[in-house]
Image: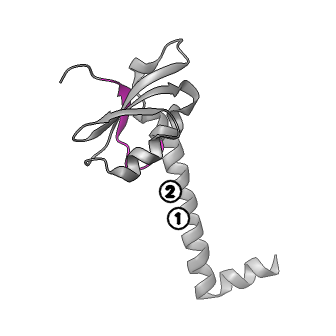
Amino acid sequence: MSLLLQALNSTRGRVVLGVIAAYGGFQLWLTLAAPGKISPELAGTSDKLNVQIELPFTPERFHVLAFQQYGRVSGTDDRSIELRGVKRRDLPAIARPYWVTSVGPIKEGG
């Protein structure tokens, strides 16, 4: 406990604790915001889904590779990535990154 008190009494310690608190708050916000990005149209009984991940920018290689761990990338568009064979339990993890604006069913046509 004395280490915490020393940290609170020093400017450097307060800055470090503030950064840790801000990082923890940001991670909590990402976790709480993720379910709101998932479309209600994905509700159902199927365990495997085909989803379209909307981004606020054109996806790059990094984004495609990041989502390949959850399913098979079948294409990209101006601001989206199509992902097939996604397990329902992985939807919150897909929606969690701050750069994902929404996750919904694949839009046919276009």
Residue 75 picture location, percent across and down: 32, 34
Residue 102 picture location, percent across and down: 36, 36
Q: Secondary structure at mark 1?
A: helix
Question: Could you tell me how many numbered marks the image carries?
Answer: 2
Real-space CA distance between mark 1 and mark 2, rounded to the nearest whole angstrom: 6 Å
Residue at the spot 52% in from the left edge and 14% down from the top edge: 46
Q: How is the image coloured?
A: one colour
Within 10 angstroms of label 1, few (less than 14), some, or many (20 or more) residues?
few
Residue 37 picture location, percent across and down: 41, 35
Q: Secondary structure at mark 2?
A: helix
Query: Is residue 92 found left or right of 50 in the rendered image?
Result: right
Residue at the spot 28% in from the left edge and 22% down from the top edge: 107
Depth order, front residue of 49/35: 49
Contact, CB < 8 Å: mark 1 with mark 2? Answer: yes
Depth order, front residue of 6/96: 96
Depth order, front residue of 106/85: 85
Q: Is residue 94 above or below residue 66?
A: above
Amino acid on which disc 2 is placed: Phe
Amino acid on which disc 1 is placed: Ala
Q: Which residue is mark 1?
A: 22
Residue at the spot 37% in from the left edge and 27% down from the top edge: 104
Image quadrant occupied by the C terminus:
top left
Question: Residue placed farthest to the top in the image?
Answer: 45
Q: Which residue is mark 2?
A: 26
Depth order, front residue of 105/83: 83
Q: Is residue 44 above or below residue 72?
A: above
Query: Is residue 5 found left or right of 54 in the rendered image?
Result: right
Q: Majority secondary structure of the magenta segment? A: loop
Report the magenta residues as a range.
96-106
Residue at the spot 78% in from the left edge and 81% down from the top edge: 3
Image quadrant occupied by the N terminus:
bottom right
Query: Is residue 109 found left or right of 35 in the rendered image?
Result: left
